[in-house]
Image (cartoon, grey):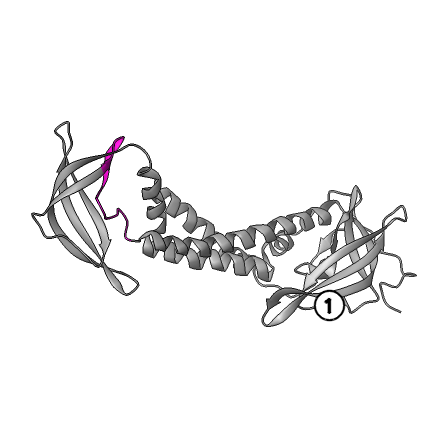
Amino acid sequence: MSPFDSSTPLPQLAPAPRSLPGFLTIRVLFGTFMSQFGWLFVAFGMLFVWVFDAGGVVAEWVAFRGGVRTASGTVTGWNSTSTSINERPVYTTSYDFRHPDGRTFSGTSYATGRWLEAGTEVTVEFVDADPALSRITGMRTSVGGGMVLLVLIFPAVGAAMALADLKRRRKALRLLRHGTLTAGQFDTIEATSTRINEQPVMRLTFRFQDEYGAEHTAVAKSHQTDRLQDEPRELIVYDPLNPANASVLDELPCQPRVGPDGNFESTARTLPSALYLLLPGISVLTALRYVASLM
């Protein structure tokens, strides 16, 4: 007889709020494929943000939308950089200019595929509130051009994926701490438009009854459906105040089960917790450090 047969009593949960092992908490929050892939996308994208100074392009765009004045300047030299855009090298042009109040400022502008010789007279645009922020008209203050903003798509998409998954997993974590346990009957299965490792992610629904006998549905999504269909009935934890908020235990990382003390514990083989925090940690620290460098 299956351990989840309707005639078999459900495991007894400890009173809420229940304590959860630290590893189980980390694994539920960050141990999914979608979470790790999202954070990998952020870390990978931030590498290109650093290389092409995409954040500098944004900072320049914001700064020069305010009060801008112009002054005459003189080129003092030029140099090449190690960066190319569309296979065209990026060059720097250095210059001096005199502020209308008599002060002299120096600056460096960037351009793709061109530079200006020393001694060339130029028009310099500068931010009225901060004259040290300037550029030669027609050039820019950062290595990357406007098209470089496309590299911001990578960390943005990755962050959206990771944070959306984190929001879902926080709900699951709350259910493990405060939810009510029941068993659900498999109902339907259908393919979604998402694929992982060339396998379609399936959407499975399970019917279950709350403590008052009302019927509800729990949804699980996975590309590994075997563990969600290996029992006639699957354990489900739901919010007693809102039974529509429910999670199938076998969908969650670590496949948590009720331990002898009534608290949830992991039953799956696991890696050290630090490995699941590695990509989120690198991504967040890199992003924060880069934002700080722009201030």
Number of marks present in the image shown: 1
Residue 47 image point, x, y percent: 38, 57
**Is residue 18 depicted above or below 183 in this figure?**
above
- Check the image and name the residue furthest to the right: 7
Q: Is residue 124 left or right of residue 265?
A: left
Horizontally, is 118 left or right of 283 in the view? left
Q: Nearer the viewer, residue 215 or 98?
A: 98
Does the magenta-highlighted stretch encompass residue 207?
A: no
Does the image show residue 166?
A: yes
Magenta stretch contains residue 134: yes
Say few, some or many: other residues with alpha carbon within 10 Å of mark 1 (under 14 / 14 to 19 / 20 or more).
few
Q: x, y (%) of residue 66?
A: 32, 34
Among all residues in the image, which is located at the extreme bottom?
198
For image coordinates 26% across by 47% down, the residue present is: 140
Q: Secondary structure at mark 1?
A: helix
Look at mark 1 in the image and give the residue it sits on.
227
Percent position (x, y) of residue 11?
A: 83, 55
Q: Residue furthest top?
A: 101
Name the foreground residue: 43 vs 83.
83
Q: Residue at x 58, y 63 (%)?
A: 271
Q: Is residue 258 visible?
A: no
Q: Amino acid at mark 1?
A: Arg
Quadrant containing the C terminus in the rendered view: top left
Percent x, y for residue 51? 33, 56
- Tell me where the magenta segment starts and ends, as one range: 126-143
- Residue at 53% of width from left, 61% of height from top? 37
Who is closer to the viewer here, 109 or 184?
109
